Image (cartoon, helix red, strand yellow):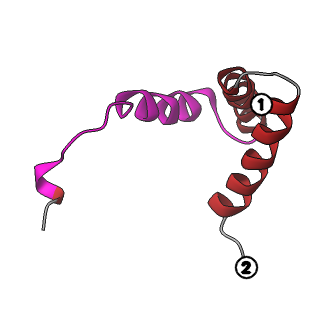
Amino acid sequence: MSTPYELVSQHVAALLQEAASAAIPPETVAGTLITEAVRIMKQHRKADDIRSELMFVIDNLEDRDYEFMRP
């Protein structure tokens, strides 16, 4: 059984291949995926919840070395 991440990842990989063959840049696909994800989330979650999740992603855009996570 696939995890949600594995399922979505497989479809995104196929989407990126199809977009490349249509000369659609990956960043355009990514922006469209964000828009679609928010549309889906709005059907099931409150705006504040969506905002919090998006802010978490934004706050963690940079790769960081978290010392507390080291063995």
According to the image, label 1 marks what residue?
Answer: 36
Q: Name which quarter of the figure residue 30 lies in.
A: top right
Quadrant showing the N terminus: bottom right
Asked whether residue 58 is drawn in magenta, I would say: yes
- Relative placement, left or right, of 57 versus 4 is left
- The magenta segment is 44-68
Counting from the top left corner in percent of width and height, residue 49 is at 55, 35
Question: Between residues 8 and 42, which one lies in front from this camera angle?
Answer: 8
Mark 1 Cα within 10 Å, few/some/many (few <14, many 20+)? few
Residue 41 against residue 5 in the figure, above or below: above
Counting from the top left corner in percent of width and height, residue 7 is at 73, 61
Q: Name which quarter of the figure residue 27 lies in.
A: top right
Judged from the image, the secondary structure of the residue bearing numbered disc 2 is loop
Asked whether residue 59 is drawn in magenta, I would say: yes
What amino acid is found at the position of numbered circle 1 in the picture?
A: Glu
**Rounded to the nearest whole Å, what is the CA distance between mark 1 and mark 2?**
25 Å
Mark 2 Cα within 10 Å, few/some/many (few <14, many 20+)? few
Tell me which numbered mark, 1 or 2, is placed earlier along the sequence.
Answer: 2
